[in-house]
Image (spheres, helix red, strand yellow):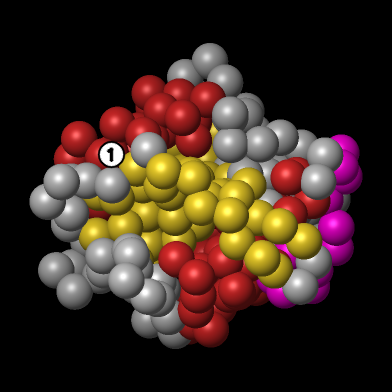
Amino acid sequence: MSVKEIETPVGLARAHVQRAREPRGSIVLSHGAGGGIEAKDLQALTALVDDGWTYVLVEQPWRVAGKKLAPRPPVLDQAWLPIVAALTSGRWALPRPLIQGGRSAGARVACRTATEVGADAVLALSFPLHPPGKPEKSRAFEAQLVLDAGLPLGVVQGERDPFGTPDDVRAALGAQAQVFAARGDHSFSRHPDDVLAAVRDWLGGLPAHA
């Protein structure tokens, strides 16, 4: 594994890159607002390197700086754009197709910026469809941006996620999004292998160009 430090307008980010020997493409994921890349589901997905995917986990600048609270969405997006630009350009550019995503708040960032960075697909883990107990404050429009752009969207959602169940996400996004259920709540901490199985299923069904 190699670690790449990337300057952004809001501070230093850190990308942990595990390259596949004969890559089928690249998967770049980031963490949520309440944790880091040590999240069990993000770590479980390192097994995708054995499947031929170059796998990158990104520590966002606020996390690298040791802060406990994530900044507002515009600041997160402002950091994400140069991170992906640095990872997809130059001599060591990641192989395509490029799948970007993340868990929770990181999934929201990936959805909002997918078209701007030229992603080929988006993977959303624990997409926070709405704040707990407030279904009227839906964030479905962020995920809809991916679908409106014609990009594949895979969502892995905990069966007891207070931010939205798999059925809630399906109802909000329709059949165009591929939604997979995993045991657990928003964290998947007890069943990270469910996430790995779901992501492998989704990747296996992607079109050749994605």
Q: Total of numbered circles in the picture? A: 1
Q: Residues within 10 Å of mark 1 (few under 14, many from 20)?
A: some
Residue 201 can be seen in this image: no
Query: Percent x, y for residue 188?
Result: 55, 26
Question: Which one is nearer the viewer's eye here, 208 or 25?
Answer: 25
**Residue 199 image-quadrant placement:** top left
Reply above or below: 99 against 37: below
Reply above or below: 78 against 166: below
**Which residue appears at 47% of the width and 19% of the height?**
191
Quadrant housing the N terminus: top left
Reply above or below: 179 against 11: above
Left or right for 44, reference 141? left
Left or right for 1, reference 83? left
- For label 1, the SS is helix
Question: Which one is nearer the viewer's eye here, 185 or 122?
Answer: 122
**Which residue appears at 32% of the width and 71% of the height?**
91
Q: Which residues are magenta?
A: 67-78
**Residue 24 image-quadrant placement:** bottom left
**Which residue appears at 28% of the width and 47% of the height?**
19
Which residue extends farthest top?
190
Question: Disc 1 designates what residue?
Answer: 48
